[in-house]
Image (spheres, rainbow, N blue to C red):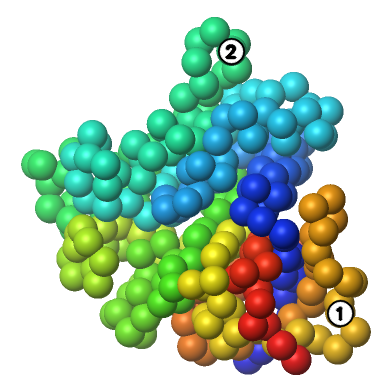
Amino acid sequence: MPSSTNVVVHTDKLSLAATLCDSVVKSSKAAMEARRSFTLALSGGSIPKMLSLDKMIAAFARQNIEPSFENWHVFLADERIVPPTSPDSNMLALQTDGFLCPPASSNIKPPTSYPIVDSTSNTPSEVSAAYEEEVKSVLGSKSAGVFDCVVCGMGEDGHTCSLFPGHALVTSPSTNHVDFITDSPKQPPERITLTFNVLNSSRGVIFAAAGAGKSDVLKAVFKKVDGSEEGPATASAPQSLICSKDDSQFPCAMVSPSGDGASLLWLVDVAAAASISR
């Protein structure tokens, strides 16, 4: 069933990243005011660099909030089952390129982050089960059972997290919070991932997609609603589109949080959005 979605178009990846950081900080502010903690899940790919420490500090400043990640609980939206020092590790990317490890000299309190258990002595099933229990435990105690915010990327094939087109986790969605695959079409093959079950129960999901390689999927998924355009995106003002969304074709389009007050936001650049039409 098509649904209405806000798609915000930016002139470039830098302005997209600024909006992403602003959106995460805004979500954290609401969560801290409501529950005194903030639960966040992050994808890998280009997301860690978009959420770099300097960009996040700038987002705090724009909202007149003292930078602090205290009482933030940061999980992986998906992870490759590899050693923690592997360049394929999403957690390593979030630690080195993202905001998870501010230097002591900054006096910024770091978040609590949750890596997977040791993959050298555990099977994918065991890694997934351990992460499932950790997710459920923290969400249950800190966030009334659901994530405050999940930040997702999107592949050129329309996958998100490690939910790939045609895969069993997509064609027969899991009822778990976390599940695993051993046959990813992208290397490395063994991964854990949040499921549609937990994504669609979240308070908010933000997608970030940039580059011409994403345009074919966005063209298939979104159609502009008549009268929704506000004029072209500029460096200082992104363009907001209200689009109908076809949920049937790609994993990324199957993410639609449905709880009371839940939100879905797509942040894209002009190259990715070039083919979206009426």
Give the residue type that dot 2 points to.
Answer: Ser
Q: Position of residue 26 (x, y in %)?
A: 75, 43
| Residue pictured at 49% horizontal, 72% vertical | 213
278 versus 213 height, above or below:
below
Q: Earlier in the sequence, mark 1 or mark 2?
A: 2
Q: Residue furthest left?
A: 121
In the rendered image, the vertical position of residue 234 relative to residue 64, given as above or below: below
- Quarter of the figure that contains the C terminus: bottom right
Name the residue tied to disc 1. 228
- Image coords of residue 191 (percent x, y): 26, 58
Residue 58 image-quadrant placement: top right
> What numbered label is drawn on residue 153?
none
Name the residue at the top extreme.
Answer: 105
Q: Which residue is mark 2?
A: 106
Please, what secondary structure does the residue beneath circle 1 have?
Answer: loop
Q: Quadrant of residue 163?
A: bottom left
Q: Residues within 10 Å of mark 1 (few under 14, many from 20)?
A: few
Is residue 267 visible from the viewing direction of this image? yes
Nearest the camera: 192 or 88?
Answer: 88
Between 3 and 250, the residue placed more toward the observer is: 250
* Left or right: 241 as drawn, with respect to 90: right
Q: Residue at x 36, y 45 (%)?
A: 90
Total numbered labels placed on residues in the image: 2
